Amino acid sequence: MKPYTFRFRTGEIIIDHLKCAKCNSYACIKADSLFGTGVLRIQDAKPTLTTNLEDAQRLCNECMACELYCQSHGNKGLKIKLDQFSS
Ligand code: SF4
């Protein structure tokens, strides 16, 4: 299955929904509601955007909490790729 991806201003979020299917915490959603701007929601048991791809780039506040929470409390399905570290 192709990863679910979307861009924010300085990078890209990559979500492996196969890993999300075995996640019990949805820590990414909790992190987004605590520190982010509500760009993520659960739809069909998977984290997806609440908005379209273009608006997501503007709305995301780049707090990076979704990745930190996913990696520490979730099933490690979400990664952030920052443009400045890509070649
Ligand atoms: S916390 Fe990670 S593994 Fe769990 S639903 Fe969110 S992105 Fe997927």
Image: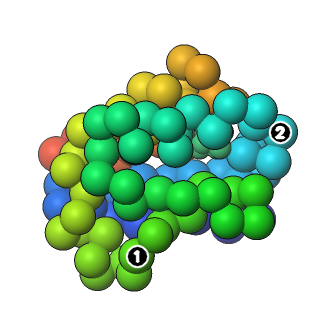
Q: Is residue 17 above or below residue 36?
A: below
Q: Is residue 51 above or below residue 37?
A: below
Q: Residue at x 63, y 39 (%)?
A: 26
Residue 25 percent across, percent down from the top left: 68, 31
Disc 1 from disc 2: Cα separation: 24 Å
Residue 2 percent across, percent down from the top left: 68, 67
Q: In front: 32, or 85?
A: 32
The secondary structure type at the circle numbered 2 is loop
Given this view, does label 1 or label 2 mark the residue nearer the observer? 1
The secondary structure type at the circle numbered 1 is loop
Q: Spot the residue most to the front.
A: 34
Q: In front: 14, or 24?
A: 24
- Whether label 1 touches label 2, CB < 8 Å: no
10 Å neighbourhood of mark 2: few (<14), some, or many (≥20)?
few
Q: Quadrant of residue 11?
A: bottom left
- Check disc 2 and report the residue beneath it: 22
Q: Is residue 28 something that shows in the picture?
A: yes
Name the amino acid, label 1: Thr
Ligand 1 closer than 8 Å to label 2 CB: yes
- Quadrant of the rendering where the N terminus is positioned: bottom right
- Check disc 1 and report the residue beneath it: 51
Please give left or right for residue 81 compared with residue 70 in the image: left
Q: Residue at x 46, y 70 (%)?
A: 50
Ligand 1 closer than 8 Å to label 1 CB: no
Q: Is residue 16 above or below residue 57?
A: above
Please give left or right for residue 50 compared with residue 35 in the image: right
